[in-house]
Amino acid sequence: QSTMPTTASIQLKSSKSDVPTGVFINNEWRESSDSSTFEVLNPATGAVLTQVAHGKAADVDEAVKAARKAFKTTWGKTVGPEERARLLNKLADLMERDIEVLAELESVNGGKGVRIAREMDIADTIGCLRYYAGWAGKVAGETIETTPKTKLAYTLLEPFGVCGQIIPWNYPIGMWGWKVAPALAAGCAIVMKPSELTPLTALYLCNLIAEAGYPAGVFNLVPGLGATAGAAIASHMDIDKVAFTGSVLTGRKIMEAAAKSNLKKVTLELGGKSPVVVFPSADLEQAANWAALGIFFNSGQDCTAGSRLFVHEDVHDKFVELLVQKAQACAIGNPLDEKTSFGPLISAQQRDKVLSYVESGVSEGATLATGGKKWNADGNEGFFIEPTVLSNCKPSFKCVQEEIFGPVASVLKFSSEEEVLELANSSIYGLGAGVFTNDAKQAMRVSGELSAGTVWVNSYNLLSNAVPFGGMRQSGMGRELGLAGIKEYLAVKSVHHNLGEDLE
Ligand code: NAD
């Protein structure tokens, strides 16, 4: 907990990169208010990468003051939509310039295969910035006809104000982009807290925000823990909205803090236990490919992970055989290797939690078809576990009910469409769902009946920046991406002009 410099030199694949490690307020770096820090690890080795400033309530308060000032003066008063679009595109250009450093940082801090970080996480985030640059100033209010006619009524869509944004560790850059792009396109000012496990890319991006030319105070980053910086954002009296992605447990705390403070608007993207349903008419090889992607992508640390696999009894055994093959073919290894697609879990705690779910599944009667163990190449200390398939699961098993957030597929057998819809929809969550069938009527019927914010038919986990994303029930409220995503950062103001109605 000693006094820290505000930059660390991080070893990447072939070079070192200077990464800021402080609190970013008003386009400047500073130590945290009490000079304390926390450790950030490389999950593939367990080694400490650096210390990062531990922002506290006092830092959040400073950041909010800076954001409020920008919102009331420069950013909010003089920067028009064309300039907001230009700045977002400029930021995207700078990310393209620095894509290699960003990809390698995302890889060493988040454990992602570097190629996937570059070609998916970062490429999609650059796309998200450009997509929302296109919406800046183009989401308009309406003129409304009224009775009496002697009135002109219209709505204005105004930026919501100062927005708190709290993001998780599973997609550090991806979730940064989903939050930052619509908020800046709408004209809001931001106080963000990255996950304490993966703050490095968000820290690096602050310098690009300043370089792009954003006025001071528009974007502020307070790294810190949930209980400190996170809680201070959720309960701040001068934050107008908080956007959160993370667990249900924390989502509840955020809503509670919002309710107890200033009733700020809350949007939540929470967990899931998404069902994937495989009918007999499906192309089984394709279904297994997509299902494997659905549960093993990002080592299963995915809010939409297709973790409950319902397979029709006629094709069950063949499907399990194919899924096991796909699991065993996952390219597990050093995330900085271009070939790696399956990296470590984010922490030792997360790995142990996932392994305890595997144990509980087996003790309740599931068959461990493959995986289920720690994986350590060359005696490394990373937090890897093998891609895992638990077959013969029953709906009541803990591994079927609860979000595992790791690479564990729980496979269940079903015999009728009616039965499987009942089972698939009986979850507290409603984030994603998948259906595999070559019967077009069945595809329409079942996708209509599945209760989830996103349903994939004959694919899984394919997102687009233009298509809204979010949850039903305890998977959250509000939407990100698409037109719906920017509307969450705009407030509707109604204006009534009296055109001649005189009061006696
Ligand atoms: P988490 O809830 O532990 O943490 C998320 C963020 O909240 C972190 O930045 C953390 O520091 C902060 N936080 C923790 N306690 C807080 C508090 N009391 N007040 C304010 N902030 C606090 O979640 P996680 O473990 O980082 O992420 C995994 C979870 O995120 C999973 O449940 C997953 O399903 C979910 N997730 C959802 C989506 C989605 O879009 N629906 C996307 C990714 C992850």
Image (tube, grey):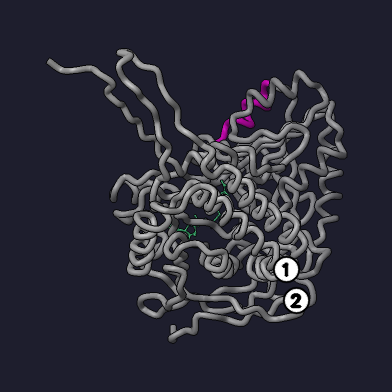
State which tag comes first along the sequence, 1 or 2.
2
Q: Secondary structure at mark 1?
A: helix
Neighbourhood count class around disc 2 (C-alpha, 10 Å): few under 14, some 14–19, many 20 upward: some
Determine the image quadrant of residue 456: top right
Find residue 301 and report its horizontal and vertical position in percent: 64, 54
Secondary structure mostly taken by the magenta-highlighted segment of the chain: helix
> Quick check: 240 left or right of 169?
left
Find residue 329 and report its horizontal and vertical position in percent: 85, 55
The kind of residue on which mark 1 rests is Glu
- Residue in front for this viewpoint, 143 or 101: 143
Q: State the residue position of label 1.
A: 100
- Residue in front for this viewpoint, 444 or 81: 81
Q: Is residue 423 magenta?
A: yes
Question: Where are the magenta residues, as a range?
Answer: 418-427
Q: Is residue 360 visible?
A: no
Q: Is residue 92 above or below residue 463?
A: below
Q: Is residue 371 above or below residue 199?
A: above
> Which quadrant does the N terminus fall into?
bottom left
Q: Secondary structure at mark 2?
A: loop
The kind of residue on which mark 2 rests is Lys
Circle 1/circle 2 CB separation < 8 Å: no
Residue at 54% x, 37% y is 484
> Quick check: 265 left or right of 437?
left
